[in-house]
Image: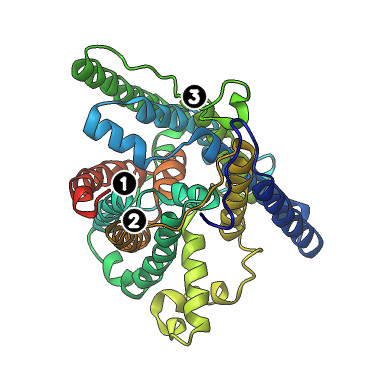
Amino acid sequence: MSALAYTLPRGGKNRFAIGLAALLAAAIFFYVTTTYSLRVAGLFGIGLLLGGVLYAASFGFTGSWRAFLTEGKGAGVRGQMLMLGFACLLFFPAMEARELFDRRVYGFVAPVGFSVAIGAFIFGIGMQLGGACASGTLFTVGGGNSRMAITLIFFIAGSVIATHHLDWWLALPSLGRISVVREFGAVGALSMALPFFAAIAVLTLWIERRRHGRLMSHERAGDAERHPLWRGPWPWVWGAVALALLNYGTLALSGGPWGVTAGFTTWGGQAAHAMGIPVAEWPYWERQQARLETDLLRNKTSLMNFGIMIGALAAAGFAGKYSPTFKIGLRPALAAVIGGLMLGYGARLAFGCNIGAFFSGTASGSLHGILWLFCALFGNFLGIRLRPFFRL
């Protein structure tokens, strides 16, 4: 047993995990408040809440997509459609006005092209081999999953490798940036987006009933009834609404939506630069020189990523589930390496991951988010077929 793991009584809390999370959070809060501003500290706070919600709601994309593709169980997918619909209701008016609470805001609107399609497909395979999406990797690492730590390391590496080839990929054919909010206004865009999400939800209901003869329960079995709020897993609806609200809070505080993988690229770029790899000479980094020198606790995405991991650590401690183990088989470890590389590489090609491209991109009104969804689903389908070889 790991030195960090010990047997907990049923319903008990892991005081080590809670104390470590509190110490790390307090230190970062103090640093960013005194060095930068309360607004920056607020973004870290949102990161902490995101980590707690993701862990407590067990709101992953990888597992829910696998459950739907292999078993026809669509509750997780319906939760994601609810999240997108609610987020669009919040985001689209701000995207049309280009301001929120007297602050200029912007969305994640990216070109609809081959790089997105190919990148999302690669990312989808990586989801099933690596074991999680971008947000899922962060909250499971924070929660003590050691195999996911391998995925995260190679996720970062894949992100940096992609920057070496990115200009070639971006030169592939593209329809350019298409925003339904810009084309049709907030009301017109909502009149298209909400029925689309509803149609996907209805399709999952039909498939689930056809596959099982009935609608499977939306209830998710927790391991204690006394403290459902912090022990989890929460109902999908709770997680969907909370994540949409926190993404909206990110938009209000920073001027832009929630993202994840740009932070990984910054971490990896700085590490490669420190090791003497000439990344500064690559075209991508020639345009991003400041990111090679920036304080990682000043960079919005990086700071929020740290917050997500610490928030998940605290949530795992309160749930009494923080118990890391370092027994990882060779094939599952190899899958984490390959999957992590594919996640990182695919995310850069696709202008983001399940958060930056799919969630925040779609909430911004960008059609590249919808293209990402369908191509990533195909990638997940193939990744599921590869899982048995790696004994997953």
Q: Disc 2 designates what residue?
A: 350
Q: Are marks 3 and 2 in contact (CB under 8 Å)?
A: no
Task: Identify the secondary structure beneath mark 3.
Answer: loop
Label 2 SS? loop
Q: Mark 3 or mark 2, which is nearer to you? A: 3
Q: Which residue is drawn at 27% across and 66% down?
A: 169
Residue at x 33% of width, y 50% of height: 127
Relative to residue 351, is residue 289 drawn left or right? right
Looking at the image, residue 369 sits to the left or right of residue 238; the answer is left
Horizontal placement of 53 versus 40: left or right?
left
| Furthest-top residue in this view | 214
Structural distance between the alpha carbons of marks 3 and 2:
30 Å
Marks 2 and 1 close (CB-CB < 8 Å): yes
Q: Mark 1 points at which residue?
A: 372
Query: Residue at (40%, 34%) from the top-left corner?
Result: 184
The residue lying toward the viewer, choosing from 235 and 95, is 235
**Disc 2 residue type?**
Ala
Which mark, by number, is residue 235? 3
Residue 232 quadrant: top right
Q: How crowded is mark 2: few (under 14 residues within 10 Å), some or many (20 or more)?
A: many
Q: In this view, does 72 lie above or below 16?
A: above
Dot 3 and dot 1 residues touching (CB under 8 Å)? no
CA separation, marks 2 and 1?
7 Å
Could you tell me residue 112's position as x and y percent? 30, 51
**Quadrant in the picture for residue 158:** bottom left
The span from disc 3 to disc 1 (Cα, nearest Å) is: 26 Å
